[in-house]
Image (cartoon, helix red, strand yellow):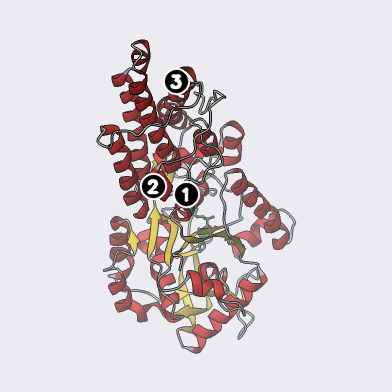
Amino acid sequence: MKKTFYVSTPIYYPSGKLHIGHTYTSTLADVMARYKKENFYDVFFLTGSDEHGQKIEQKAKEQNKSPKEYVDEIVLTFKDLWEKLDIKYDRFIRTTDEDHIKAVQKIFSFLLEKDLIFLSDYKGKYCISCEEFLTFEQMDKDFVHNVCKNTAIDFQEETYMLRVSKFQKYLQDLFKTDFLEPESRKNEMLNSFINTGLEDLSVTRVSFKWGIPVLENDKHIIYVWIDALSNYITALGYGSDNTSLLEKFWAKDSEILQIVGKEITRFHSIYWPIILNSLNLKTPDKLLSHGWIISGGNKMSKSLGNVIDPIELLKKYSSDAVRFYIINNLPTDKDGEWTEELFIESFNINLANNIGNLLSRVSNMIIKYFDGLLPKKEVAKNNYLVKIGEETIVNYKKFMDKYDMSSAIKEVLKLSQECNKFIEDTKPWALEKENKLDELNEVLTILQKNIIIISYLLKPILTKSFSSMIEQMGLKHQEINFDSIEKNNFNYKKIIDKLVLFERIKN
Ligand code: ME8
């Protein structure tokens, strides 16, 4: 039976257009989904939109629209962005989808019946912008939220609460595993929320209407987080008549990766495992909580207004260039900067100078010296570059399997540098002058083989350029995968065109 892999992004709020921060998370997920497919996994990739809540209700009102009219328009811009960026998801879930609404009501009723949810009067500080109750650690002395810089409001009303406190031991045990990454985030959760004693969580509201009603008490709306978190299983059919996807992808032996930004780690590492545990479902294998893209020292966010619009960026640059910068330049365990200067610099150094240059030099030499087709040649197994090529595949896989995409790509870039150095060392032009054609053929065959490896390892990232890259090496419509790449007995065709890939960006 095929192995299965399930990957999700957060479902984003349609309270405005998406920015480069959202693009970051979705690209990470898309690259992982594509990598797993190359490894013969059956993959399910989920993304979507989180459409309920007070903030959306307010935004719609400002524009004189019904909430549904308002979100319908914004969701189209989400889908348009994913298409332009070549993000290939299997389902785009909307929390206004009929099947999701029904399933969330079932989940709520089930938890209520098990007395894991109870009615209470709650008093606390609430951030409308983040739809989150805040602890004192999350605010300054004037109650300004340290993430979005909005002032939290006093909040008191009748609300249903989730009995989070009952799961103290369960969470302490869960946090002994490596389910949450990176380690620093794990410590933060332990120190700020778990070890200080878990507090019950308010999960309904009576102050607004735009949301899923509690069946048992329809003056209450199910508050965004139970609604939103449940999307990861309702999208697979939880609570519906057809649970085949759930049985396949949320199964014990299915690999489940959830990728989120660090500010919502609390919801995904504390409340979500509690809900899953209550429903008798497994905890995801990995919660990858990545850092922020910052701008001017603060998190880039809609509410701070310091955002970069990816659609504008994609008018100027290719989706491959944007995807490359995200994976190569923004390691998930740190915060990262996005500036156009850094983006152009990285493109020119890595894609134009290193890889693009290598591709064009080698294909030009194959055309010039062998009329576009190298005679079949067994290359020496102990050649150092052949060995580095093979090691690169192993190292790349090792990092990718740990979801460390940025380190994986560095391995590929190193191989490309080695290839460029190999050209300088072996001087193919001199071999041709001295008429050492057999040696020349061997040098070019080794380079060609390694360029195929480089191109293939970049395939999950450079989705649009990949076929041109291998075409430039004489491969067209060939099945390349991790098995065939090691054997490398491809059927090469004559290279005719001199393609220019990754042309330098002038700044
Ligand atoms: O939180 N840097 O939606 P949201 C990196 N609906 N990533 C960023 C980012 C930045 N500056 N800004 C946004 C929500 N992101 C909820 C989620 S899930 C059940 C519900 C990314 O529209 C990152 O993944 O505010 C972050 O967690 C997410 O967008 C927040 O998107």
Nearest the eye: 208 or 227: 227
Q: Against 304, is 441 above or below?
A: above
- Can you give x and y, in whole percent of width and height, for residue 480 in the image? 47, 45
Q: Secondary structure at mark 3?
A: helix
- Label placed on residue 405: 2
For label 1, being within 8 Å of ligand 1 is answered no
Name the residue carrying label 3.
365
Residue placed most toward the observer, 112 or 470: 470
Label 2 C-beta lies within 8 Å of the nearest ligand 1 atom: no
Q: Residue furthest top?
A: 433
Q: Amino acid at mark 2?
A: Met
Q: Which mark is residue 31?
A: 1
Front in this rendered view, residue 451 or 250: 451
Question: Is 384 placed left or right of 161 in the picture?
Answer: left
Image vertical order of residue 408 relative to residue 72, above or below: above
| SS assignment at label 2 | helix
Q: Is residue 334 left or right of residue 114?
A: left
Instruction: Give residue 143's quadrant in the image.
Output: bottom left
Per the model, the C-alpha gap separating discs 1 and 2 is: 8 Å
Q: Are marks 1 and 2 in contact (CB under 8 Å)?
A: yes
**Where residue 189 sits: x, y (%)?**
33, 63
Placement of the N terminus among the 4 image quadrants: bottom left
